Amino acid sequence: MTDSLKDRVKAATGGDEQQPEQQPVTDLAVNDTVRQWLQRRQTYFTDALPRHVDKAHFTAVALACMEKLTSCTPASINTALLACARFGLEPDGKHAAIIPYGETATFQPMYEGYIDLMYRHPRVDSVHFGWVREKDQWDYTPTEPSPRDFFHKPRVDLAEEERGPVILAYAFAWIDGRRSQVIILNRDQATKIRDKYSKAYKNAERKGTKDSAWHTDFDAMWAKSCVLRLRKVVPTSTELADLLQADDDFDDEQTAPPVIRGTVISRDDQAQPGEQQPPTASWPTAAQPGSTAQDSTEAGAEL
C-alpha cells in the first residue's frame, strides 16, 4: 500500500533524533543564522525537487519567506519546505505558501500551484481561470453546446475599479483538444465553502485573531475553491491526488458540481444554421506552466 504524503514527509524528515543540527527557535530570528540554517539543508530540499524546478531559485524563494517564520519551530519549517520541494511548488505566495500558525509553519498550496500540477498531466492542453466583474459582458447557459454555453468579454475599455466588483470566478481546461465543463463559483458559494470546510478560518474566528487566509484575502481563497472544483473534470495525476490529501482546507466531493468524472464537452467551432458564431477573442488567455491566466493576478496568492 502506497504511503500517504504525510507519511513520506515524516519518513523523509526522520524525526528529531536524526537532526541534531537543528537550532532553537530564537536562533531563527537572526538573518545570518536563518541563511546558514537553510544552506545546511539546501541539498536536502533541492534533491526532492522535480527536474523542471531551478534549485537556486527555489532556495532563494525559500530564504525570502523565512522572515515571517521566525516564531515557528525548525522542525515544522523543515517539513513545510520539504512538502514544497516534493511538489515542485516554490513558496512564493502564488504557487504555494508557508503559513505560520503559532509555532507551526504550515504548507499551503495556492490555486496557481493546483493549475501547475494539472498541467503536468499529459492529456491537459491548457487551464483557464478568470474573474467576471459586474460590468463585464457574460452569459452562462449550461444547456447550450460548447462553446456557446459560456461567454465572457471583459470591459477592457474601463479601468479595473470601473468594471465593478468581482461577481463570479470561473475555470475550465482543454483536455485532448476538447473543452471541459466550465466551473463557476459565486461569492455566496465561496462563503459557504469557507464556513463549512476551512479549519483555519474556524480557528481564527474562535480565537478572535481573524488572521486566516479567508480573513486576509477572501478573493484568493475564492479563486482556489473554484480551481479545486475543476479537479473533478480533469485527469487526476498522483501528484494532484497527493496535494489534495496534504491540503486540509478544501471542499469535499459533496459540494462539487454534479458532473461525471473524466467526461469532456466536444469543441464546436462551427455555428449551427441560423446561429451566430461566438466571438473567439473574448476567451481568456490560456495559463502556461509557470505563469498565470489573464486575470490571475487579480486573485493574488491562493492560500
Image: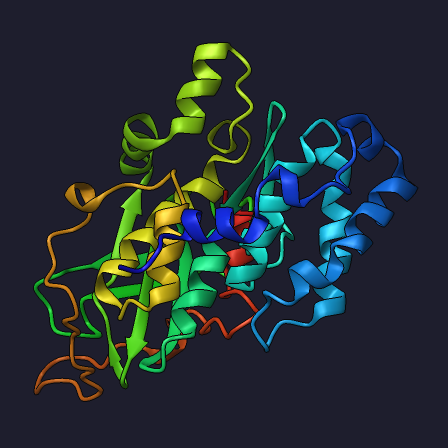
Q: Which image quadrant for residue 67? A: top right
Residue placed most toward the observer, 58 or 18 = 18
Q: In this view, does 87 lie above or below 111?
A: below
Give the percent coordinates (x, y) of residue 264.
17, 74
**Which residue corresponds to the image point at 65% horizontal and 45% vertical from the top-left?**
18
Q: How many labels does the image show?
A: 0
**Front residue of 181 and 7:** 7
Q: Quick check: 148 above or below 85?
A: below
Q: Which residue is drawn at 53% across and 65% down?
A: 292
Q: Which quarter of the picture shows residue 274? A: bottom left
Return the x and y of residue 240 as percentages of the image width and height. Answer: 37, 61
Which is nearer the eye, 76 or 126? 76
Q: Is residue 249 left or right of residue 92?
A: left
Give the residue drawn at x 59%, y 65%. 48
Q: Where is residue 278 in the image (x, y as percent from the top left)?
A: 26, 77
Q: Quadrant of residue 140?
A: bottom left
Q: Residue 117: horizontal and vertical position, in percent?
A: 43, 66
* Position of 282 relative to 301 (above/below): below
- The quadrant of the picture occupied by the N terminus is bottom left
Q: Could you tell me which residue is drawn at 11 percent across and 68 percent down?
A: 144
Q: In this view, does 259 lie to the left or right of 40?
A: left
In the rendered structure, the answer to whether residue 144 lies left or right of residue 202 reads: left
* Residue 53 showing in the rendered view: yes
Q: Is residue 230 left or right of residue 47?
A: left
Residue at the far front in the pictured view: 17
Q: Nearer the viewer, residue 65 or 55?
A: 55
